[in-house]
Image (cartoon, rainbow, N blue to C red):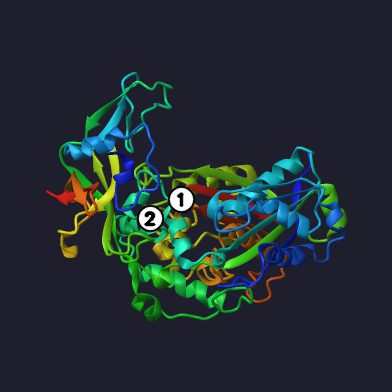
């Protein structure tokens, strides 16, 4: 069977308000992804459109985006696992190519969160939990992760300062990322002094809503070798879930969906955590990156704090993490985020990340979570 | 009265578990148990996916539980503005883990993970009903 490669990656500038339509927003990512490839839109056999539903006024956005990019009459369809949608899209693209059904597939993720008023957006988010059993209590995304943070602190002695150090690291790289919403370094004092959103998480522990798009062009091995000199190979895929409700969670100090997805991805790729040269992890909140260190096996359970204390997740450390600034700096346009993470790792493995390059990176990992740990995707790539 | 009156803001009313709210009015917080295989469920399920039976019974979550985690929420979603700050928490009882609110009567400095709690129904403004954890 054919190996499957990523041949093109792109993303729009992420911003608080993009001021264009969703299809124009997607064009920005699509153009960058197609740059330098020896194919045109008519060579794309199918497109997978990824976003979280109900932020867009356009019902069934796949049709609108497909028309604008002139991908008709090829098939297009919608994939959703909220914040993890475009990693799920990549998984589906891999299957379509591996099966032989298609040879080139475009995975396009987007979110235009500014299309709604902030009141409307807040209403959507309040329905992000289980609407019968948990939304009526006022669960929010920060609140869900805050409960994990509190449990992690109690069990392992993790502190608010440990979490703040993660934001400081990511902001130092975000400052160099021209496509990030927030391009400013922050100090430990800035983070620790910011207002409390859901204790113990403060404003600077949280990522921000944003508008943005991403595009990944995936191709079968023979096509990939023909149309680009720098294919990046998909060698490991893992996907898992946990309960929609917080009541159903068996573990409160880590995400079981990450642990399960990571096990699958490492197994398929035949690599271990220590083989990963650079990683993008889903830092929607600082505690999410801390748990990812442990759930992905970069640190033992409870020892994630040492990783950040000793700066081992900075460039030059054992396992550089989120050297594009992470969601904390880039902003989090839900459906576009996974594709943006994949873009970062592909650029790292190609040696193209001049603003923050991990020297000689050969194997990279992308960890993309949906909701408060309801959906987990881990993807391992090799140059 | 059913789920249309559950919690601060409810989003849907129709569920086979509507008796849960009737039990709250009677002063009880309930979970379900499959009569065929004995599996217990919270949130209550009126169907058992383990053995595909819908022959389930209600049982009361009685006795003491332990606080597993909590957060004090300063910014609530739409409809919860007047509630904030409020405390969300998870507590473990015999056989079930329960998510809900922790009573505001507890001082923040007195909240400790592992502390003993009970879960009891509470009347909410606007003739609504919910449940909360209280320190024992």
Q: Is residue A16 above or below residue A126?
A: below
Q: Is residue A245 left or right of residue A293?
A: left
- The quarter of the picture where residue A238 lies is top right
Q: Earlier in the sequence, mark 2 or mark 1?
A: 2
Picture mark count: 2
Q: Is residue A281 left or right of residue B125?
A: right
Mark 2 secondary-structure assignment: helix
Residue indicated by mark 2: A144
Q: Is residue A73 above or below residue A307?
A: above
Residue A341 visible in the current orientation: yes
Single out the residue that lies furthest toward the top. B36
Which is more toward the observer, A73 or B62? A73
Residue indicated by mark 1: A373
Residue A310 visible in the current orientation: no
Q: Is residue A17 above or below residue A147?
A: below
C-beta proximity under 8 Å, tags 2 and 1: yes
Mark 1 secondary-structure assignment: loop
Quarter of the N terminus of chain A within the rendering:
top right
- Expressed as whole percent of the image width and height from the top left, the position of residue A189 reads 37, 80
């Amino acid at each position: 069977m054919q190996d499957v490669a990523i041949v093109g990656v792109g993303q729009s500038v992420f911003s608080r308000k993009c001021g264009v339509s969703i299809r124009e927003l997607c064009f920005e990512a699509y153009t960058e992804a197609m740059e330098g490839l020896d194919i045109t839109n008519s060579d794309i056999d199918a497109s997978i459109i990824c976003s979280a539903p109900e932020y867009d006024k356009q019902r069934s956005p796949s049709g609108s985006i497909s028309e604008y990019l002139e991908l008709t009459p090829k098939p297009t369809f919608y994939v959703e696992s909220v914040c993890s949608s475009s990693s799920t899209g990549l998984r589906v693209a891999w299957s379509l190519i591996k099966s032989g059904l298609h040879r080139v597939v475009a995975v396009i993720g987007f979110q235009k969160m500014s299309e709604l008023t902030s009141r409307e957006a807040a209403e959507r988010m309040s329905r992000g939990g289980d609407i019968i059993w948990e939304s009526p209590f006022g669960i929010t995304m920060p609140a869900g992760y805050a409960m994990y943070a509190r449990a992690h602190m109690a069990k392992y002695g993790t502190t608010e300062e440990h979490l703040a150090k993660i934001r400081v690291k990511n902001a130092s790289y975000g400052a160099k990322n021209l496509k990030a919403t927030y391009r400013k370094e922050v100090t430990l004092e800035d983070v620790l002094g910011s207002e409390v959103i859901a204790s113990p998480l403060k404003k600077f522990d949280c990522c921000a809503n944003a508008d943005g798009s991403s595009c990944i062009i995936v191709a079968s091995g023979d096509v990939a070798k023909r149309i680009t000199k720098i294919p990046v190979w998909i060698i490991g895929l893992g996907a898992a879930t946990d309960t929609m409700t917080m009541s159903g969670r068996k573990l409160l100090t880590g995400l079981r969906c990450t642990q399960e997805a990571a096990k699958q991805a490492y197994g398929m790729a035949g690599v271990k955590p220590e083989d990963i040269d650079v990683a993008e992890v889903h830092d929607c909140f600082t505690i999410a990156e801390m748990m990812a260190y442990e759930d992905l096996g970069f640190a033992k359970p409870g020892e994630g704090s040492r990783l950040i204390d000793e700066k081992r997740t900075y460039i030059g450390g054992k396992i550089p993490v989120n050297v594009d600034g992470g969601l904390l700096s880039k902003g989090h346009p839900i459906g576009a985020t996974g594709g943006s993470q994949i873009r970062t790792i592909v650029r790292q493995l190609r040696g193209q990340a001049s603003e923050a390059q991990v020297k000689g990176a050969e194997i990279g990992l992308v960890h993309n979570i949906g909701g408060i740990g309801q959906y987990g995707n881990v993807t391992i790539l090799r140059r | 009265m059913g789920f249309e009156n559950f919690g601060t803001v409810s989003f849907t009313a129709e569920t086979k578990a509507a008796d849960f709210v009737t039990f709250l009015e009677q002063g009880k917080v309930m979970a379900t148990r499959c009569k065929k295989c004995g599996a217990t469920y919270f949130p209550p399920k009126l169907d058992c996916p383990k053995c595909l039976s819908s022959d389930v019974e209600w049982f009361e979550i009685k006795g003491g539980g332990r606080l597993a985690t909590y957060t004090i929420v300063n910014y609530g979603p739409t409809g919860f503005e007047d509630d904030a700050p409020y405390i969300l928490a998870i507590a473990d009882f015999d056989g079930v883990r329960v998510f809900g609110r922790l009573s505001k009567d507890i001082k923040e400095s007195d909240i400790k993970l592992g502390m003993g709690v009970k879960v009891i129904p509470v009347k909410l403004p606007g003739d609504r009903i919910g449940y909360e954890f209280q320190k024992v």
